[in-house]
Image (cartoon, grey):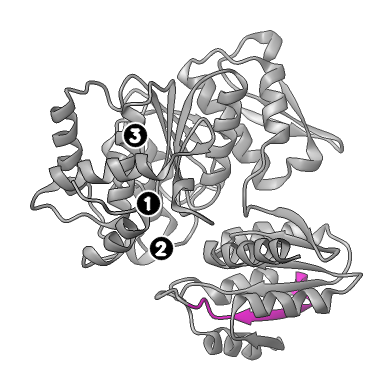
Amino acid sequence: MTNRLLAEWLELLEQRHPCEIDMGVERVATVWQRYKASQSLTGEVGKSKVITVAGTNGKGSCVASMQAILLANDYSVGSFTSPHFHTYNERICINGSPVADHVIVAAFESIEQLREEISLTYFEFNTLAALIIFSHSDLDMVLLEVGLGGRLDAANIINCDVAVLTSIDLDHQQWLGDTRTKIAKEKLGIARADRPLIIGEKNYPNGFDKLVQDTQAKPLWLGKDFDFTENNQSFSICPKGIKKDSDFITLDKLSNKGLLAVNKTLALQALVSVGFSLHANKCRSALNSVSVLGRQQRITFKSVPIILDVAHNPAAAAVLADKLRSEQGKTIAVASVLEDKDWPSMVSQLKSEVDNWHIAELTGISRAAKGQSLLKLLYNTGIEAVLSESVDQAFQSAVSEAGKTGKVVVFGSFHTVAKVLDFISMEVIGE
């Protein structure tokens, strides 16, 4: 045992493993089996049902929607997501609340004792800690968000009861492959034979049907087996497998547009597929009120409307552009990205919806793209932009420029949105 604080543990884990990303499940699976044996644990994660969610975009909102539905229907739930915005504890929640530092530290200490010669990445430690905590929490459901891909992700050491695939687009090509077909194959690795696989992607890549067939799972396809319908005021979800008098759950369309509507539909279908008893009115209330930090999140700062979105790939940028297209007034963008992101394609998706650009480099982030490189691409595209020394400065400049008639959209990465949220919090505290 050690007397390390959580912050000290996290600093150690960030430095210890030679690779930030080291794909493969063998190391983490071995340590997990050692832990289960040491505690005489049975089942995958205690007695809990497990839903694992993979996809290029939409994982976070899908998990948040499932969590809201479960809590509204009086089920206990643990959720493991990444990354975090403010504190590490956000990654591991029980019944919607982040677990305490000492609980995570105790899990880390157990992992440290059992791993012996095995080196684990930061994310692998995270995953094991979540599983340890959940296995002792007597939960009805565990929700696992894949960190990267699916087949070789640490979360895939668990045989889930239901797998959810939200979307398939180009991102992380250096690890997952350079085509949507290759990426789909990696993400489908979370599916299990003879168990439900909820598919939210309608624009299938080449060979997708065969890839799904190879999993031997029981697929449920959005648009074929279940769907949602829309009108001007509302949209209605029609899951497969619930009683006739609850066939449709109608939600307010104003807060349930685009990708968010899709992911709420996937969330409800996944829970129905598990076999939980759900009440339509409780589901309706939960889905109408659920909000996801940093996903088309709307706030106001100094009387200026702010849209916060973690969009960090071309597909997510396209969804954000569609959102901005319906907005009134001038749009000022604040953006910073990681160096492995397709910045040119993101700009291409958004340039017609953004009036002015404020760019910054993500200080303190080793994988951050250089500010000058981001600026150069904009200039080469015929777009003038302002380069700031930090995201904070870029945001302040954008808010000033927006004035009384404009709005600010912040996007590019989780880090970008987190820095703006932190800045706003400090400004509010200082008032």
Category of crowding for the residue at label 2, using alpha-carbon neighbours closer than 10 angstroms: few (below 14), some (14–19), many (at least 20): some
Of 420 and 109, which appears nearest the observer? 109
Tell whether position 108 is magenta.
Answer: no
The answer to whether residue 351 is seen in the rendering is yes
Residue 133 marker: 3
Report which residue position mark 2 lands on: 172
Of 70 and 198, which appears nearest the observer? 70
Contact between marks 1 and 2 (CB within 8 A): the answer is yes
Report which residue position mark 1 lands on: 149
Magenta residues (range)? 352-363
Q: Residue at x 8, y 53 (%)?
A: 117
Q: Position of residue 71 (x, y in %)?
A: 58, 25
SS at badge 2:
loop
Using the image, determine if residue 57 lies above or below residue 314: above
| Viewer-side label of 3, 1 | 3
Category of crowding for the residue at label 1, using alpha-carbon neighbours closer than 10 angstroms: few (below 14), some (14–19), many (at least 20): many
- Label 1, label 2: how many angstroms apart (C-alpha)? 8 Å
Q: Earlier in the sequence, mark 1 or mark 2?
A: 1
Q: Position of residue 65 (x, y in %)?
A: 59, 35
